[in-house]
Image: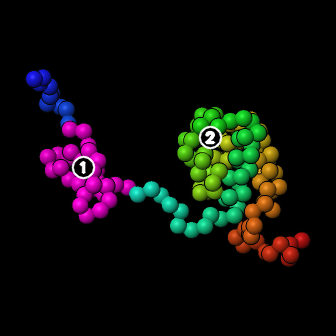
Amino acid sequence: MQTRVVLQHEKPIPLLGHDKSGPAVRKHPGPGTGAVTPMHQQRIPREPRPAPQRTLGRAVREMRVRFGLSQEGLGFHTGLHRNYVGALERGETNPTFSTLLRLARGIDINLSELITLYEQRRSDVKGETLVGAPPRNQRR
């Protein structure tokens, strides 16, 4: 029979399991408490994504594919996490100006090129209206 020596500083590995009441729970080996907390649920967008964000996401995806990069590759070149790049392409995030600059620099284009592509693709997304902008038939 083999015996494993356990050092004092080692803590038990958190286990996943199902509580009888429902969802999976994560057992935290807290300071002697063994508290049980519910696991985080996957984030699901509650509202439809705004059309401008979806359009920008399409433009970013098109530029990324044009340069032969994966989401992970674009993330590496821009310093953004690959999951963030994916969320941006799906229109789930509204990037800041500095993020847009990082994207443009990461694929070695001018920001104006990305914005131009966005404007070209704007008509691809049905029902897009900008907040505070007059309807298209009233624009000059």
Q: State the residue at coordinates (26%, 43%).
A: 14
In the image as oriented, which residue stretches furthest toward the top?
A: 2
Residue occupying image coordinates x 47% and y 58%: 43
Instruction: Read off the magenta span.
Output: 12-40
Is residue 76 on the magenta stretch? no
**Up-down: is 60 above or below 139?**
above
Is 22 in front, or is 139? Answer: 22
The residue drawn where x is 29% and y is 47% is: 16
For this rendering, which residue is in front, 63 or 139?
Answer: 63
Instruction: Residue type at mark 1: give it.
Output: Lys
Query: Which label is found at residue 71?
Result: 2
Identify residue for label 1.
Answer: 27
Q: Could you tell me which secondary element the residue under label 1 belongs to? A: strand
Q: Is residue 25 left or right of residue 81?
A: left
| Left or right of residue 55, residue 116 in this image | right
Residue 12 figure quarter: top left
